Image: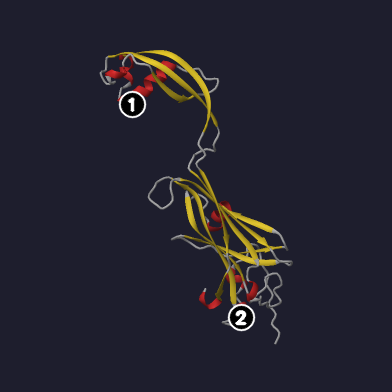
Amino acid sequence: MIFSIIFFTISPIYLDTIFAEDKVISGADNKDITYVAKFVCGSIIDDNGPLRPGHYNTDISITNKQLSKISFLWTVSVNDGPTSHSTLMTLDHQKSTGLDCRDIKKVIGLENNTQVGGFVYVTIPQNYNPANPNTVVQYSLDDINLLDVQVFFTANALDTLPHEVVLEKISFYIISDETGKIPKQMIKTTLDVTLNSKLNVISDTERKVKEILSSTYDISENEFDKIEIRIKNVSVGVGSMIDDHAISLSIVKPQVYPQNEK
């Protein structure tokens, strides 16, 4: 018996469109090869969940290890949220592609969401070869790992990438304090504070010190005149921001699912 299936498709191609007639052909024993990759995208600003505050990104790399073309479907499922349509992709032999957070958010329609997490399903249909829709193919289950799927996670707790910063160390005395808010043992004692500095910007060093004292001892700006200080020395140095950055790589193993269980 010969079956002929003809499709007219426009990218992206959706799962329910591709297999509308194929379900009549396939039997209950046909199985699909599926790779399930977890993703986390966006920024977390509180510590209410298992992930610490930071900026998260995910990159899923897919490589065709075979000597012929392979077509597969990728689908996004958001935790406690929507599931996307399945999009068809075809990789030539020994070629690779990637899916990152921009692709994931776009296909699910959540580009403006601050943080999104869930799973990406990469499925190779077993009873249908999208690269040649006029034939029905059954791959050998002895070698189901047809693709190399790797997930690269990055997390950074800093708002900006690590970089060198200019620091100024200010040594000073507090001559008198009429507010009575500064501890007496700090009066007429050599003190110092280290602050971030900006290049080519004129600043009032004495006011900087008073602003630090203000935030530390609850002194209002109107009371600045009641504090008399003397600047002893100002030194400038260069430091590096701490790289609070983490990366991890995960290799996804394929799983086989009977179609009637999906």
Residue 129 occupies which quadrant of the picture?
bottom right
Asked if residue 117 shows in the view, the reply is yes
Which type of secondary structure does the marked residue at label 2 adopt?
Answer: loop
Q: Earlier in the sequence, mark 1 or mark 2?
A: 2
Q: Is 112 located above or below residue 124 in the figure?
A: above
Q: Could you tell me the amino acid type at mark 1?
A: Thr
Residue at which label 2 appears: 26
Check disc 2: other Cα within 10 Å, few if <14, some if 14-19, many if 20+: some
Q: CA distance from mark 1 to mark 2?
A: 73 Å
The residue closer to the viewer here, 128 or 219, is 219
> Residue at the location (34% across, 26% down)?
215
Q: Is 196 located above or below residue 130 in the figure?
A: above
Residue 17 occupies which quadrant of the picture?
bottom right
Residue 74, how many percent across, how many down? 59, 63
> Residue at the location (30% across, 14% down)?
226
Q: Is 140 located above or below residue 64 in the figure?
A: below
Q: Which mark is residue 216?
A: 1
Rendered-image quadrant of the N terminus:
bottom right
Asked if residue 21 shows in the view, the reply is no
The residue closer to the viewer here, 39 or 16, is 39
In this rendering, position of residue 84 left or right of residue 231:
right
Q: Could you tell me the amino acid type at mark 2?
A: Ser
Figure disc tally = 2
Q: Is 33 located above or below residue 61 in the figure?
A: below
Check disc 1: other Cα within 10 Å, few if <14, some if 14-19, many if 20+: few
The residue closer to the viewer here, 111 or 168, is 168
Residue 45 occupies which quadrant of the picture?
top left
Which type of secondary structure does the marked residue at label 1 adopt?
Answer: helix
Residue 4, how many percent across, how many down? 70, 80
In this rendering, position of residue 55 left or right of residue 131:
left
Q: Which mark is residue 4?
A: none
